Amino acid sequence: MTATMPPDLEAPARRTAIGTLRSLVGIVVQLAGGAVLSIYLPRALGPESYGLFAVAASVALWVETVGCFPFSSGLAKLIADAEDRWRPLARTTVFWGVLSMGAVAVLNFALAPTIAAALHDPGLTPYLRLFVLDYPFFVVFVLLGSILNGRRLYERRVLLVSAYWIGKPVLTVALVAAGLSIRGAVLASIGASVVAVVFGWRAGGVGRPRPATSLRPLWAFNWPLVIGLVFFQLSRSLDMWLVKTLLEDARAPAYYAIAVNLHSVAFLLATAVAMAAFPTIANAVREGNRTALLGLIGNSHRFVWILGLGMLAVFVPSARAIVTFVFGPAYAPAALPASILLGGVLALATGSVATNALVAAGRPRVVLLVNPLAFVVSLALYPLLIPRWGVGGAAAAAVAGFLAYALLSLRLQHRVLKAGFPGRMALRTLAAAAAVAVVGRLWPAAGAWTLLEAATLLGLYLGLLWALREIGREDLAIVARAFRLRRR
C-alpha cells in the first residue's frame, strides 16, 4: 500500500524510482530492437536455421558475459564510491578488459570446432569463429554502461543502450535481406557493438584507456561475484545447449530460443529496478541510513512484483495465440516453454533484488552460496526432464533453479541485512494478477485481436492495483518527474 515516506527515505527512494524509469526508457528501446530481431529472424531464417543461429549466439553471449565479469562486476559500486576520483579506475578497467577479451577471442577461435562437436553440429564452427570479432567491442560497451550507472548518468546510459539496440536490428534486416542469412545476423551483432562504442565513448568521458591504477580493489571486491555469476550465467545458457544435444528435432532450439527471448524481455524490465537501485543502496549503506536502505529494498521488490506479475497475467492466458500471431504458426510449440519461463521471471528478479542489495551493502560473497545452488538444482533436473518433456521440460528445470535462487537470496537478505520481504504487497498484487488471468482465460482471442486483449488486460490490472491502493498518486508523480513532465 502506498504511503507518505519519511524525509530520510523519500529522497533515496525517489532517486531509485526515477533512475529505474529513466533506465526503462533505454530498456524500451532495447525491447523494440529486440522485438524486431525476435520477430524478423525466425520468419526470415526458418526454424532450423534460426535454431542454429540461436545456439551460436548463446555460446558467444555466454563467453562475452563471463569474460566481462572480472571487470564489470561491482564496477558500478566502486565508481559510485570513488565519486570525483572515478576516472583512473574506469580507464584501467577498460584497458585490461579489451586486452583480456582479445585473448579470449583468439582462444575461442581455436576451440570453435571442439565446441561445435560437443553440441553435435559441426555447422556451428564458422559462426562461432565469426562471433569472436565482437568480443573486444562488446566488453567496452558493457563497461561503459557500468561506469555511467555508477555515476548515476542514466540519460547517457540510455543513449549508449539505444545506439546498440537501434543499430543491431537495422543492420540485421539489411544484411539478412541482402542474402547473407545467418552470417549476416552475426555481422550485424558485431556492427552494433562497434556503433555503440563509437557513439558512447564521448558520453562515457573515460578518455584514453591505460593502466592508471591498480585493479586489486576491484578484484578483491568482485571475485566472489565473478565465481557466482559464472554459475548464474551458465544456468541461463546450459538449457539451450542441452536442448540442442538431447533432442533430435532440429527445430527444438528455435522453439526454445523464442521462449528464452520472451523470458529475457520480461527479466530485463523487472531487473531495471535492481540496476538503478544499486548505487543508491551503496550510498545509503555508506551513510549509515538504515531507514533508507530498508525502504529501497522493499520498494525494489514492489516494483519487481508489479511488473513481473503483470506480464505473466497478460501473456499466459493467450500464450499460444500471441506466439502464433507474432512469430508465425511454425513456432506455436514455443508457447508452453515461454509461459513456464515467464513464470520464473518473478523468482529470478526477486532473487536479483536481494543479491544486488547484499552486494551493494558490501557483502559480495553471498553470491558464492546463491548462484551455485540454482545451477546445481537445474543441472540435476535437465537430464531428467528434457528427454521426457522436450522444451517444456527444459523450461521447468530452469524455473526450479530460479525458485531455489530466490528463496535462498531472500533468506540471506533477511539474515544479513535484517530486511524482510513485503508479503502483504505480494498478496495484493498476486490477487490482481490472478483476477486478470481469469478474465483473459475467459476471453479467447486470435490474430490481431490478441493485441486488443493484451491492452485491455493490462489496463484492468493497473486499475485493480489502484483500487487495492498498491499504486497511487505518488507513483504517478515519480513517473512525471522521471520524464520531466510538468503540470499546467
Image (cartoon, rainbow, N blue to C red):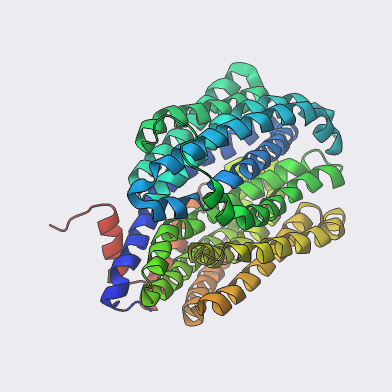
Question: Is residue 161 visible in this depiction of the protein?
Answer: no
Q: Which residue sits at x=63%, y=18%?
A: 179
Residue 356: x, y in percent? 52, 62
Question: Is residue 69 visible in this depiction of the protein?
Answer: yes
Give the image quarter of residue 131: top right
- The quadrant in which the N terminus is found is bottom left
Q: Which residue sits at x=40%, y=79%?
A: 468
Residue 158: x, y in percent? 39, 43
Q: Which residue sits at x=81%, y=33%?
A: 116
Q: Residue furthest left?
A: 488
Give the image quarter of residue 2: bottom left
Seen in the picture, residue 46 relative to 17 is either above or below; the reply is above
Residue 221: x, y in percent? 56, 56
- The quadrant in which the C terminus is found is bottom left
Q: Which residue sits at x=43%, y=75%?
A: 294
Judging depth in this view, the residue of 406 and 244 nearest the camera is: 406
Seen in the picture, residue 459 relative to 83 is either above or below; the reply is below
Judging depth in this view, the residue of 251 and 219 nearest the camera is: 219
Judging depth in this view, the residue of 470 and 408 nearest the camera is: 408
Judging depth in this view, the residue of 48 and 306 nearest the camera is: 306
Residue 15: x, y in percent? 32, 61
Give the image quarter of residue 180: top right
Q: Residue furthest top?
A: 178
Seen in the picture, residue 414 relative to 255 is either above or below; the reply is below
Q: Residue furthest bottom?
A: 424
Q: Is residue 218 left or right of residue 200?
A: right
